[in-house]
Amino acid sequence: MKTVVYPGTFDPITNGHIDLIERGCKLFDRVILAIAPSTKKGPLFTVEERIDLAGQTLAHLDNLEIVCLNGLLVDFVREHNGMGILRGLRAVSDFEYEFQLANMNRAIAPELESFFLTPAEHLSYISSSLVKEIAAFNGDIHKFVHPIVEEALKTKYANR
């Protein structure tokens, strides 16, 4: 069984993420969405909320598992019998950072591969940070996130 891990904070999960996950689920037997707590980044949603939002928006995928990522990514991939790491590249600016991460991961765990997918063109500019910024000012985000995520963002910012 070919398993890959798609790690990230997913704060919140966007249509760009969903596109990559759906495509990854077609390419691999099993995709593990590994959601990192990333408390240093000061996420808007708790890791439990992010796991729940991902679960609701991706319930249609039978070969997807959603879990919390704790510890070193390469150790996590090994523990879950993964063959590699799935990452998204939106723009050239992402490439340099992702290239560095891939090489570091290869140095630590040479048996693991890094797989890169680009999002559909109409989703390539979407980022969780931009979506949160627009939502914070009550802007229209329906094109960027699933309706469940849109509602969660509205609720989160209404209670701030």
Image (spheres, rainbow, N blue to C red):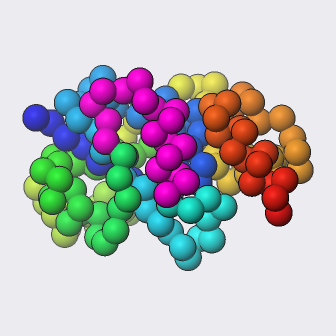
Instruction: Examine the image and state in which quarter residue 151 appears.
Output: top right
Q: Quadrant of residue 28?
A: top left
User: Which quadrant would residue 32 be assigned to in this image?
Assistant: top left
Residue at coordinates 34% horizontally, 31% vertically from top-left? 24
Residue 157, percent across and down? 80, 55
Residue 49 in view (yes/no):
yes
Q: Nearer the viewer, residue 151 or 38?
A: 151
Task: Name the spot of residue 59 as percent of width and height, x first.
Answer: 43, 30
Position of 43 with respect to 130 (left or right) is: left
Question: Number of numbered discs present?
Answer: 0
Left or right, residue 138 beside residue 5: right
Left or right: residue 88 versus residue 126 is left
Q: Position of residue 56 (x, y in %)?
A: 50, 35
Instruction: Give left or right: position of 98 versus 84.
Output: right
Q: Is residue 113 above or below residue 122?
A: below
Q: Which residues are magenta?
A: 48-65
Q: Return the residue nearer the eye: 112 or 137.
A: 137
* Pick the front one: 136 or 85: 136
Q: Magenta segment: does it hold 53? A: yes
The quarter of the rendered structure image containing the C terminus is: bottom right
Q: Is residue 94 visible?
A: no
Give the residue drawn at x 49%, y 29%.
Answer: 19
Residue 49 locus on image (x, y percent): 55, 54
Q: Residue furthest bottom?
A: 40
Task: Give the quadrant of the N terminus.
Answer: top left
**Residue 10 versus residue 17 in the image, above or below:** below
**In magenta stretch: residue 130:** no
Which residue lies at the image location 61% right of the left edge and 64% below the top edge? Answer: 43
